[in-house]
Image: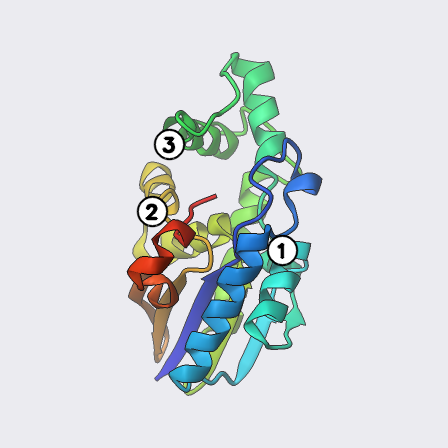
Amino acid sequence: MGEIILVRHGQANSHATTEEDYDRLSDLGHTQARWLGEWFRDHDQRFDHVVSGTMRRHRETVAGIGLTADEDARLNEIDYYTLSDALHRVKGEPLPTGDTFATHMPKVFAAWQAAEIEGAEPYHAFEDRVAALLDDASQPGRRVLCVTSGGVIGMILRHVLDLDILKMSHVMLPIYNSSIHRLNVRGEATYLAGYNAIPHLDDPARADARTHY
């Protein structure tokens, strides 16, 4: 049996208004990554291959964990800021706030999938690159760690669980920064084995470190 371990990056710059400004870990994000690395070492978690997206927040998370990784742009996040701006221009949808993000995200993905709005890449290109990455990472007998972002994790779960676009949005919303998601590879099939685990943040003293953005 093989295993794919997906890790979302640590908390990024949540006060940003552009993708470029968002793409760096906060002080807490660096701490979350370091704690995750300590948990991996304390529990003898070893990997045959480590791969991350090419974004700064991915690279900083890998460094905080204490690993080195090959980089693969297929693990890069969508540019949600561009998509939000497009939805605002085309449909008049207000830009999201912390209180409205849960209802905003499904609207963005539905409009993007229907090609009613355009982002940095077409929806089908995002879907296809994540599917190709998942296929390459599904290696029987090997444990592959992928450091990525919430949108990519959501799309991987869409492929594995055959989720529609609304349900994909719903599984993305609760994903914690620095969380762990596990897939088992058995023959030609890949199965969800764990979702949104944060064992390195279980200590009640770390409750304030459990962040979504």
* Residue picked out by circle 1: 57
Snapshot quadrant of residue 121: top right
Considering the numbered disc 1 on the image, is that residue within a helix, a strand or a loop? helix
| Residue type at the position of mark 3 | Ala
Snapshot quadrant of residue 89: top right
Residue placed furthest toward the right: 20
Q: Residues within 10 Å of mark 3 (few under 14, many from 20)?
A: some
**Residue 125: % across, % down:** 59, 47
Q: Is residue 29 left or right of residue 193?
A: right
* Residue picked out by circle 2: 171
Q: Is residue 110 left or right of residue 49?
A: left
Q: Residues within 10 Å of mark 1 (few under 14, many from 20)?
A: many
Considering the numbered disc 3 on the image, is that residue within a helix, a strand or a loop? helix
Question: Marks 3 and 2, Cα distance to the nearest angstrom?
Answer: 11 Å
Q: Is there any visible trace of residue 139 in the rendered image?
A: no
Q: Nearer the viewer, residue 122 or 152?
A: 152
Q: Is there any visible trace of residue 74 in the rendered image?
A: yes
Snapshot quadrant of residue 56: bottom right
**Residue 62: % across, % down:** 60, 68
Question: Marks 1 and 3, Cα distance to the nearest angstrom?
Answer: 23 Å
**Residue 105: % across, % down:** 43, 32
Which residue corresponds to the image point at 43% horizontal and 57% vertical from the top-left? 156
Q: Nearer the viewer, mark 1 or mark 2?
A: 1
Which residue corresponds to the image point at 53% horizontal and 57% vertical from the top-left? 9
**Residue 127: % across, % down:** 51, 49
| Residue type at the position of mark 1 | Arg
* Residue picked out by circle 3: 102
| Residue type at the position of mark 2 | Val
Residue 111 vs 174, above or below: the answer is above
Q: Are marks 1 and 2 in contact (CB under 8 Å)?
A: no
